[in-house]
Each structure stands twice: as structure tokens, then as C-alpha cells.
Image (cartoon, rainbow, N blue to C red):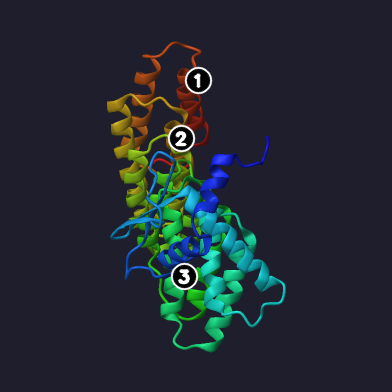
Amino acid sequence: MSRSLDKDLLAHLKADDPNRVYKDISTVLTDLPDDELLEIEFLGKSHPLESGVNYLRDGPAVAIPKLRLAQAFFVARQILQNYQEGGSSMNGSDVNAATTVLLLMDPEHLTAANTRKRLLMTTLEMSKPNELILRREKQFVDSLLTSRLYRHAKSPTLWSHRRWLLRLFTANGLVVDPQQDIKNVVMIAGIRHPRNYPAWHHARSLLDRCPRLAGSIAIDVKEFCLKNHTDISSWSFLIYAVSKIEDGDCRCNTSSLILADVISITDSLHWTNETVWVFLRNMIATNPVYKQQYESFLAVNKRLASAVPEDSDQWRTLDTARYWCEKFCFGIV
């Protein structure tokens, strides 16, 4: 596929001052609102802006034309290259601003992410206290992860940067609420990009920081799963969350409560998709449950299996789930 730009696009790129465009977009990304994440989205050719207007903003909501972002990207890339080629005298905030534009354009820009890490470490060594600096960085990263940006929500580079950042929080004695992060960052990213394995993998690291919250987190995630029942990544995390409940009685109560709710809505809506039934069979195979929920599982399984053609994909899913539970059942209380 040709990488050449058409003449119309080239004309638009040259029409406006790219440095002005870069300045406007980088300012939006660095001057973040207090205690609120940006909601960024891109505008295509169907939403042209007049000359000199480089973005639209309404509170935390920001819309940036893709063409303007491309113009800003070229300027930001040049700033980063100058910095790498010996620009140690360059202002760190200017380089940091350039990385915000680079990561907005390309969430897998590893050089930009690593440059932010180095700049952040340098800033932390030179200034005290560190809380505001770290929380601003977290705010920027979370804005990218939760905005209506399909690639960013599932970016391994951005999620890795966030995990690294949380380790800095711990090293500086700062507290992060794992339950709120899962609700306000991971779940939103899971909506923006369904089956978002990097996001739910990050949720596991958040839960590992505070296992005592496993029960309440599991209840929150169950609600997400019921609203997004084809999302295998969230169902998988739900099983993990239940397995992290340390008290045996509490784990049995929670697993049975979750099973009862999921089996009830599965029966009501006639769900026969593999995602839900893999979750149900694995919950019973890996956690203690009450006899009532186990019997409900078998009854609903039998009822739904009788309503679909034998040897169909749905029938095989249901039959495999029943066989799995009968053979590998963890324990009936």
C-alpha cells in the first residue's frame, strides 16, 4: 500500500502554521482540568473546522481533527529527535509536551513513553513533594486510556506505563484506590474496546495490591459482565477476583451469590454463548458453591440444551459445560 499523501491532504497540511497547531494541542493535553479526566475524540473530514481553530472543547470533552493532530505530530517528533540528539539543555516541560502529542497520535510510541519516564524521574529527584507530579501523570495516562480512542484503550504500552507509575506511587507512600481505578479506568477502557485483555490484566495487578477488596470488587465486576456478557476478558477477571477472597465462608457466599444472579439472567435471556457458559463451568470448577446454585446450573443447562438443535454450536457449548462441572466440580456445600 502506498504511503504517499494525496495532493488535497498535502495542501491542507501546508495551509496552517504547524507550530501554532502543535502549541494549541499540546497545551490542551498538558493543562489538565482539576480532578477530572479529559474525554478526547478525533474528528474526521466530515467535521472540518475553520482556519485557526485547532480543536473543540466543552468542559473535559475535547475533539481534535485528525489532520490537525498529524500536523502537530510532525512538530512533536522533531522536538523529540532534537532532544535525543543531544538536546540536554532543552526545557524538560517542552519535551514532555511533545510526548503527549506523540502518544495521542501513536499509543505504541515506546520512545515517547520511555522519555516521559526519564523526565518524570528527573523531576521527582529535583522537587518535593511528589504527589501532584505523579497524580498529573496518572491523570494524563488515564485520559488516554478512557477516551473514545479505540487503539489507546487497549494499548500495551500505555497500560505498562500505568503499572510502572503505580509502583512509583507506592515508592513515594501515595495511596491509590484499586476499586475506584477498576471502576473508573479499567471498566471504561473495557467499554471503549471490548474484550480488552490488557485492561483486565491491569485490573489483576490492582487487585493484587489490596486482596482484601476482592469481594466488593467481584460484585462490581459482575454488574459489568452482565451488561457486557460476550466479554470473555471481564468474565475471566471475575473468576480471578473471587479466587482472591481469603475467607472460605465469604468466598463461598460470594461465589454462590454471583452464580445465582448470572444463572438467573442466563435463564431469563436464554444465553447460550460460549463466553457465559465457560464462566459458569469454571466458577463451579474452581470455587465452593452451595448445592442450590449447582442444581440451578444443571436445570438451566438442561432446559436451554433442549431448546437448541442437537450437535449445534450452542448445544455443544452447553453439553461441554455440564460435563466439565460434573467431572471437575470444586465442592458443593
Instruction: From the viewer's side, name the closer residue of 274 and 281.
Output: 274
How many residues crowd mark 3 within 10 Å: few (<14), some (14–19), many (20+)?
some
Relative vertical location of residue 311 with respect to residue 146 in this rendering, above or below:
above
Q: What residue is shown at x 57% (from left), y 79% (from top)?
A: 121
Between marks 2 and 1 in the image, the one whose residue lies nearer the viewer: 1
- In primary-sequence order, the first of circles 2 and 1 is 2
> Is residue 288 visible to the viewer in this orientation of the structure?
no
Location of mark 3 (residue): 137
> Which class describes the residues within 10 Å of circle 1: few (<14), some (14-19), or many (20+)?
some
Which disc is residue 250 wearing? none
Amino acid at dot 3 = Glu
Foreground: 278 or 14? Answer: 14
Q: Are marks 2 and 1 in contact (CB under 8 Å)?
A: no
For disc 2, the marked residue is 281
Q: Residue at x 55, y 52 (%)?
A: 14
Label 3 residue SS: helix
Q: Mark 1 points at which residue?
A: 316
Q: Nearer the viewer, residue 5 or 130?
A: 5
Three-letter code for the amino acid on which mark 1 is drawn: Arg
Above or below, 152 relative to 2: below
Q: In this view, does 143 lie to the left or right of 167?
A: left
Res 213 visible: yes
Q: For numbered disc 2, what is the local secondary structure?
A: helix
Which is nearer the N-term, disc 1 or disc 3? Answer: 3
Q: Position of residue 207 (x, y in %)?
A: 45, 60
Which residue appears at 45% of the width and 67% of the height?
138
Residue at mark 1 to residue at mark 3: CA–CA distance:
48 Å
Which callout, 1 or 3, points to the residue nearer the camera?
A: 3
